[in-house]
Image (cartoon, rainbow, N blue to C red):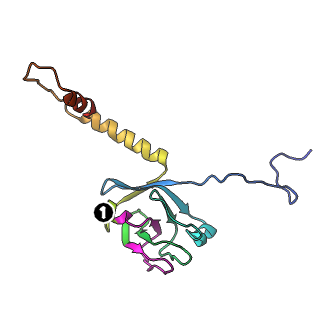
Amino acid sequence: MPDEGLLTPHTRVHVTTMNLRTYCVYNHTRECFLSLGVTPADTTIARLKGLIGKLRLRIDEGLWVVPSSGVHTIGVLFPLDLIYLNEKHQVVHLVEHFPRFRIAPLRIQATSVLELPTHTIYSSQTQMGDQLLICSVEEIANRFNKGSAARIKNQPQRVETNLTSQPPTKEEKVLEENRP
C-alpha cells in the first residue's frame, strides 16, 4: 500500500493555483501606505525574473527584492520607483521614475529594494531615513486596530453644549454622525 503524500519519480503533480504571498508597505514616518500588494522576490529564480514579462504594474502592486543591493530593468517594459532599504527597513536610497532597460545603482548599505509604480515616492513624500513597515495584511490590520483602540481609550471626553433651542439641521446631523 503506497504512502499517501509520498512523491515518487512517477508521481504526477498538477498545480492549479499559486498561493502568492503579498505584503503591505506602510511608511511609518509619513503615516501613509506605499502599496497594499507587494510580492516578495526572495528566491533566486524570483529575483532573476523580477517584473520581466509584465506589461504594466498596477498602482497597488510592487516587488520586494530581498536580499538585494541593486536591481535592473532589462526586459521590464515600464519605468519604476525604487526604494532601497537597510535591514531595519529604513530608506537608504531613492530613485524616482527609473527608466526601463537600465541597471540601477548598487547601494552597499541596502539589504532589499522595493520596485513600485512611478509616482509612489512623490505621492507618499517618502524620504531618506523614513521607517517602513512591511508585513501581511492581517498583521497591519491588527496593528491599526490596537492603535485605534488605544487612541479612543485615551481620548478626552467631549462635552458639547447646544446654545440654541432649535433642532439640528440635516447638515449638522450628518456632521455629528461622521464625527470620530
Position in image of residue 84 (x %, y %): 42, 70
**Quadrant assignment for the N terminus:** top right
Q: Residue at x 17, y 29 (%)?
A: 158
Q: From the viewer's perspective, is 167 left or right of 73?
A: left
Q: Dividing the image into 4 quarters, which one contains the C terminus? A: top left
Picture quadrant where residue 143 is located? top left
Callout 1 amino acid: Gln
Numbered circles on residues, count: 1
Q: Residues within 10 Å of mark 1 (few under 14, many from 20)?
A: few
Q: Residue furthest front?
A: 170
Q: Residue at x 72, y 52 (%)?
A: 16
> In front: 179, or 147?
179
The residue stretch that appears in magenta: 95-121
Q: Is residue 103 left or right of residue 34?
A: right
Q: Tell me residue 59's x, y (percent).
A: 44, 59
**Residue 130 appears anywhere in the view:** no
Q: Where is residue 24 drawn, in percent x and y?
A: 45, 53
Q: Is residue 105 magenta?
A: yes
Seen in the image, is 93 located left or right of residue 50? Answer: left
Q: Is residue 83 above or below residue 152?
A: below
Q: Looking at the rendering, which quadrant does residue 35 occupy? A: bottom left
Q: Residue at x 43, y 72 (%)?
A: 110
What residue would you read off at disc 1? Answer: 125
Secondary structure, mark 1, is loop
